[in-house]
Image (cartoon, rainbow, N blue to C red):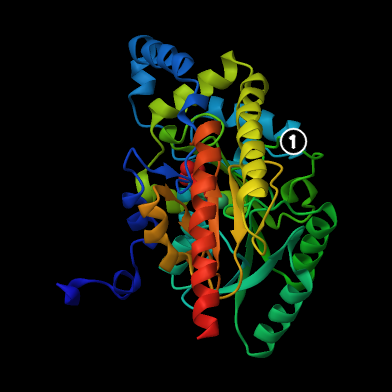
Amino acid sequence: MERFFSQRARNIRRSVLRELLKFTQRPEIISFAGGTPDPETFPWEELAEIAAREIRENYAQSLQYSTTEGDTGLREELLKISRADGIEAELDEIVITTASQQGLDLIAKTFLDPRDVVYVELPTYIGAIQAFRAMEAKLVGIPLEDDGMDLDALRKKIAADRARGERAKFIYVIPDFQNPAGVRWSEEKRRELLRIAAEEDLLVVEDAPYRPLRFAGKAMPSLKAMDEHDRVVFLFTLSKILAPGLRIAALIGSEEIVDKIVAMKQAADLCTPALTQALAREFLRRHDLEEHMEKIRTCYREKRNRMIEALERYMPEGVRWTRPEGGLFLWMTLPEGVDTERMFPKALERKVAYVIGAPFFVDGTGQNTMRLSFAIATPEEIEEGIRRLAEVVKEELAALSATAQV
Ligand SMILES: Cc1ncc(COP(=O)(O)O)c(C=O)c1O
């Protein structure tokens, strides 16, 4: 069979994480592994009511094909939200995508030839790694610091790549409450990144699924809002603020870029489902999104606080974690020598699960890291799960120091 596969398909692998996640679904396991939002935050009653009406009274549109650009009413609603966030864009600068993952796939297909360089954070979102690698891009990782990417390191890498004659296309970043690390970029670094992009003639892909989920700290402008030269392609999804099952997101960029993305999308799926676009449009028209998001933020703030308190109480010396001001994730770094993949079965034995960190690093590092989601578990489960995890970590550290002494 192998001989039938394209070169691309031969190189592509299923995500290790998706495989590991299968083990974490048993009900007795407290899982910090999933990347999904809390279903209790979905506005299911409102959506059920809209769905019934849209199908009964508007089936000629809602069960029909949509245009590839997407429902005009929905695009207008999303533009209003973006404007309130400082992004000035017009209708021909936005396209609805079958959630952001498709946005990433279309960006990869639109911009990347084999061996083109993409700069990414270390660590970064696995779905983006998969989408860019599928186009045979070369991913160059730049360390992520507490306030964003290490931009000196970025400058050096760009210079070195240029000297070697490499062709770089864009920098992919998640500046708000990053997946996986929960980090938020400072305003200075945001401005500096745009300066670098302009000097080096690179595009910036700003992926912002967690941006609306800020439950602490002050508001920070998006890169797109500060983009004066149409260098930023902005991805904005409803997955974390309404429901990922809708598969609705928007890509905002220059008219020229959006036009190419639309052409690429025609080949991918003709259009995003008209029905879920109608659900999203009507929800945004009839309900107060800000009020809905405030409920979500309250839910995640409480869970994040509970997780940090538990970590402070139970984790041994030498373990570090981020203190996210939004989003769903917290990032934990264990002392050098710990391998979180090797430790994973021991955690499962104790009925607690996390996501191993290494797959988020494009340079093969990160063995001593893990991602913890505070979104799904209840506050009580968070407390108990962190207690169990701390036991596993303590045992692992004790075993490591015992072997070091032999
Ligand atoms: C950084 C990032 N980008 C994109 C996505 C994809 O989201 P969706 O396709 O549901 O919009 C996710 C999902 O977890 C994510 O964390």
Task: In the rendered view, tell whether residue 65 sits above or below residue 345.
Answer: above
Q: Position of residue 253 (x, y in %)?
A: 64, 49
User: Is residue 364 something one can see in this rendering?
Assistant: no
Q: The N terminus lies in which quarter of the figure? A: bottom left
Residue ID at (45%, 61%): 131
Specify the farthest residue to the right: 188
Residue ID at (51%, 77%): 402
Front position in the image: 380 or 80: 380
Question: Exactly how many numbered labels are in the figure?
Answer: 1
Task: In the rendered view, tell whether residue 205 sits above or below residue 272.
Answer: below
Query: Image check: 38 left or right of 301?
Result: left
Residue ID at (63%, 39%): 304
Looking at mark 1, is its residue's CB closer than 8 Å to ligand 1?
no
User: Is residue 227 something one can see in this rendering?
Assistant: yes
Q: Position of residue 132 (x, y in %)?
A: 48, 65
Q: Secondary structure at mark 1?
A: loop
The quarter of the displayed image where residue 93 is located: top right
Residue ID at (37%, 12%): 52
Q: Amino acid at mark 1?
A: Asp
Task: In the rendered view, tell whether residue 357 sits above or below residue 73.
Answer: below
Q: Position of residue 17 (x, y in %)?
A: 40, 58
Query: Image check: 84 left or right of 94?
Result: right
Front position in the image: 400 or 83: 400
Q: Which residue is mark 1?
A: 85
Q: Position of residue 65 (x, y in %)?
A: 35, 31
Q: Badge 1: few (under 14), some or many (20 or more) residues near its Cα, within 10 Å?
A: some
Specify the farthest residue to the bottom: 164
Query: Image check: 179 left or right of 211?
Result: left
Front position in the image: 368 or 212: 368
